Image (cartoon, grey):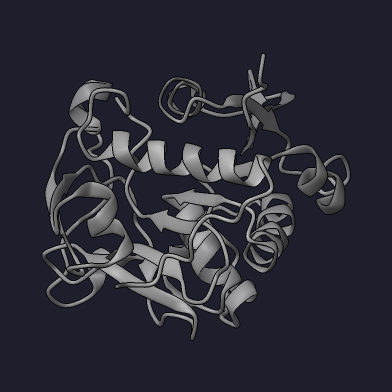
């Protein structure tokens, strides 16, 4: 039987009962990879002491960079930390950012979601704004403070995509509905970061890395939620899974420049 590709899903650090250190991530991430991408989903710690870059690259066929409450530290893009930047996880920064750069160089598939979107952006030279709802004309993209999980992850705004771009080709449309649960956003995009989709208020929502030899995409929303049933999430995770199968077979996924 042919083995499915193995996707490494980055974990977040937690303190269980406020005292026991643990690495974990949401079950919806592993379910999306296993059920929709049709890959083996394995989580790895976001700690360089136990997750060396070379071994990660050799072990996994592709990588999913998930959301997380801590933000990328602003010193990674040359800014001073302020209270608006919130909490940080420097270990995750030290794993995720070099991992993105290595995947882009090698053509190894990488998909970023929410914080993972910001990691891809920063790794490729972008800066972030700590609180986009404070910018003139911007909406509040943060997770609603109350309600059920279904209500918090409900579709809340449209994303307009570049016609003929990689996301429009994946989704079969240049307009899609998404959820939104983030506070930060891209301020200035790096030279190779192509903004391929925006929210109605102009906030960047979908990016890819220009000139990447393989699959290097990220979205600011959370497509892992209800991925099997969502008409936007499903083709995204299917495309990611195919890229991982191509890598496993020794083929590079096509560069995703606009046609």
Q: Quadrant of residue 17?
A: top right
Name the residue: 27% across, 42% down.
Answer: 143
Q: Is residue 155 left or right of residue 224?
A: left
Name the residue: 38% across, 33% down.
Answer: 224
Whether residue 67 is visible to the viewer of this picture, yes or no, is no
Question: Residue 90 in the image: x percent, y percent?
Answer: 70, 56
Q: Is residue 13 left or right of residue 139?
A: right
Question: Residue 194 in the image: x percent, y percent?
Answer: 38, 75
Q: Is residue 81 left or right of residue 199?
A: right
Question: Residue 180 in the image: x percent, y percent?
Answer: 25, 46
Quadrant containing the N terminus is top right
Q: Nearer the viewer, residue 47 or 213?
A: 213
Q: Nearer the viewer, residue 124 or 69?
A: 124
Name the residue: 63% across, 31% down.
Answer: 5
Whether residue 18 is visible to the viewer of this picture, yes or no, is yes
Residue that protrudes farthest toward the bottom in the picture: 191
Quadrant containing the C terminus is bottom left
Q: Quadrant of residue 175?
A: bottom left
Q: Tally the numbered discs.
A: 0
Query: Looking at the image, is 132 positioned above or below residue 4?
Result: below
Q: Nearer the viewer, residue 106 or 245?
A: 245
Question: Residue 86 in the image: x percent, y percent?
Answer: 49, 57
Query: Looking at the image, is 138 positioned above or below residue 174?
Result: below
Residue that protrudes farthest toward the top in the picture: 1
Query: Looking at the image, is 53 positioned above or below residue 201?
Result: above
Q: Is residue 49 left or right of residue 3?
A: right
């Amino acid at each position: 039987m042919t083995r499915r590709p193995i996707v490494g899903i980055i974990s977040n650090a937690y303190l269980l009962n406020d005292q026991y250190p643990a690495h974990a991530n949401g079950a919806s991430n592993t379910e999306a990879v296993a059920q929709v991408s049709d890959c083996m989903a394995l989580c790895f710690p976001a700690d360089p002491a136990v997750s060396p870059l070379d071994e990660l690259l050799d072990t996994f066929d592709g990588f999913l960079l998930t959301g997380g409450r801590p933000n990328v530290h602003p010193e990674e893009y040359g800014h001073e930390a302020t209270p608006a930047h919130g909490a940080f996880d420097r270990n995750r920064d030290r794993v995720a950012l070099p991992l993105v750069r290595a995947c882009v160089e090698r053509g190894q598939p990488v998909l970023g979601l929410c914080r993972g979107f910001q990691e891809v952006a920063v790794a490729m030279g972008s800066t972030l704004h700590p609180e986009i709802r404070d910018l003139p004309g911007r909406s509040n993209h943060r997770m609603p403070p109350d309600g059920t999980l279904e209500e918090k992850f409900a579709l809340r705004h449209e994303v307009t995509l570049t016609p003929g771009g990689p996301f429009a080709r994946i989704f079969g449309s240049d307009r899609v509905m998404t959820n939104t649960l983030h506070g930060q956003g891209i301020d200035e995009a790096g030279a190779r970061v192509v903004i391929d989709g925006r929210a109605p208020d102009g906030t960047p929502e979908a990016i890819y890395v220009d000139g990447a030899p393989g699959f290097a995409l990220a979205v600011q929303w959370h497509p892992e939620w209800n991925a099997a049933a969502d008409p936007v999430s499903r083709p995204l995770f299917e495309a990611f899974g195919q890229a991982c199968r191509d890598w496993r077979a020794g083929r590079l996924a096509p560069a995703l420049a606009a046609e």
